[in-house]
Image (cartoon, rainbow, N blue to C red):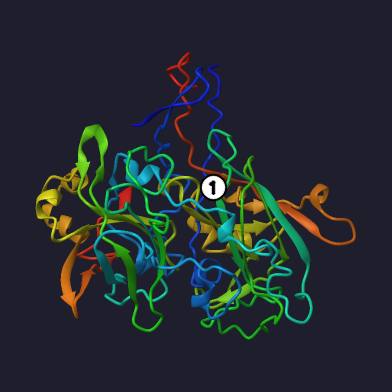
Amino acid sequence: MVQPLNYLKETASQTAGPYVHIGLAPDYAGFDIFETNFSNVVAGPNTKGERIKIEGRVFDGTGAPVRDVLIESWQANSDGKYNHPEDKQQKPVETDFRGWGRICSDFETGIFTIETIKPGPVPGRNGKTQAPHISLWIVARGINIGLQTRLYFSDETAANADDQVLNLIEQEDRRKTLIAQRSDRDGETVYSFDIYLQGDNETVFFDV
Amino acid sequence: MTIERSNSERTVRMAGEYFQRDRNLQPPAYTPNYKTSVTRSPQKALLSLEQSLSELTGPVFNHNDLGPLDHDMILNYAKDGEPIGQRIIVHGRVIDESGHGVPNTLVEAWQANAGGRYRHKKDTYLAPIDPNFGGCGRCLTDDEGYYFFRTIKPGPYPWRNYVNSWRPAHIHLSVFGPSFTQRLITQMYFEGDPLIDICPIVKTIPDEDAIKRLIAPLDLNASIPLDCRAYKFDIVLRGRRSTLFENRLEGN
């Protein structure tokens, strides 16, 4: 008889439900309880880099916007460094750069926005560089386990063409589901990024 | 990945990747008996990704993020008295699949009040709002991964799935771990609740044992006499390839 491996099993996920805001963003649920609320502002005013706004909606299989969605974002700063002790690159991280944002969609319109700076390219595997991107994690009622995806930038054509992760997507027309479209609005840089949970335009989600 | 030499000359630490998530224990996306999942579940296969620095890192939280009463849901929204209901402590450890405690990680909790009503502008259940109960709390685990909350036992409540669907009493828990790959939201149920076995959301989980691990037992040893009962709930996050020592390069 061989010995058992004895690893524990990961706790099962359950949907965050319709009232996820109560715990993770109580100001959105309509009340004030914590001294600090986490927000969709990823980079403070002293963070260098190009200021951008990301705007989008999450759509369900019927084409309706998911208006109770909660998204978390995770990204590097403009030098391509994560605000985490395991990123050993000899680069500075601004003190007001968290790199992480918690974003709720609007209960009426379903629109979510992220206020941040455009990240730089970050190290990938085997010494290759990854195109600038933001990792996203999506939960809502009806989503049994959080969905992971990435947002890339439409003005990074060359870097995107070389990116290991984008190139893993065998169906080339699905790569575009991960690319946010850049536009200018009243002097502000806005990237549009809609997420499709189902259907012909279904966003590529990852098992990482 | 990166190699780090510690101050002691003896050890070399290598930042390993995280274990593959066992999807047989996790609810699939499409679970038609939980009706909302029908239109909100991706239908195409997930793309398997090798982990990079983007996944091996994640947000770091510290005590500056938290207020002194954030973990005490009995007091953190009290206005002119304490909330109505059964006083309980929820406590346990956040550990990984190798059994290591996960220190300094943010655990966030939210729940209905004793009557089963959420303090949320979208909750229209006719049970009353408790003026002294907010229904959310958060804390950081200690060096061994231990966490605790003090709260009121939530009530079951009706929801629109079947004509007559009631959620078992539960507390939602959100946990981070040190990396973006470990992010987890789950629900803790209470030992002895007959609604657990017939809940379509519980039953999205295909594995009986995985369901049992979401049910917290009564823990009288951690209860406070004549004050508060306790329920113990351990949370297991994904494991990580263990620390490499230079005299044991193969890991564990």
Where B28 sits versus B124, above or below? Answer: above
Would residue A17 appear left or right of A77 to someone viewing this image?
right
Q: Which residue is mark 1?
A: A11
Under tag 1, what secondary structure?
loop
Q: Which residue is depicted at the point 31% across and 71% down?
A: A60
Badge 1 amino acid: Thr
Q: Residue at x 34, y 82 (%)?
A: A109
Q: Is residue B186 above or below residue A125?
A: below
**Quadrant in which the N terminus of chain B is drawn:** top left
Q: Quadrant of residue A134?
A: bottom left
Q: Looking at the picture, how far across and down is residue B27, in whole percent?
A: 45, 53
Q: Chain of mark 1?
A: A
The image position of residue B216, as x and y in percent, is: 68, 52
User: Looking at this view, is B51 or B14 the one in front?
Assistant: B14
Residue B25, x across and y down, in percent:
48, 46
Left or right of A90, for residue B24: right
Q: Is residue B38 left or right of residue B166?
A: left
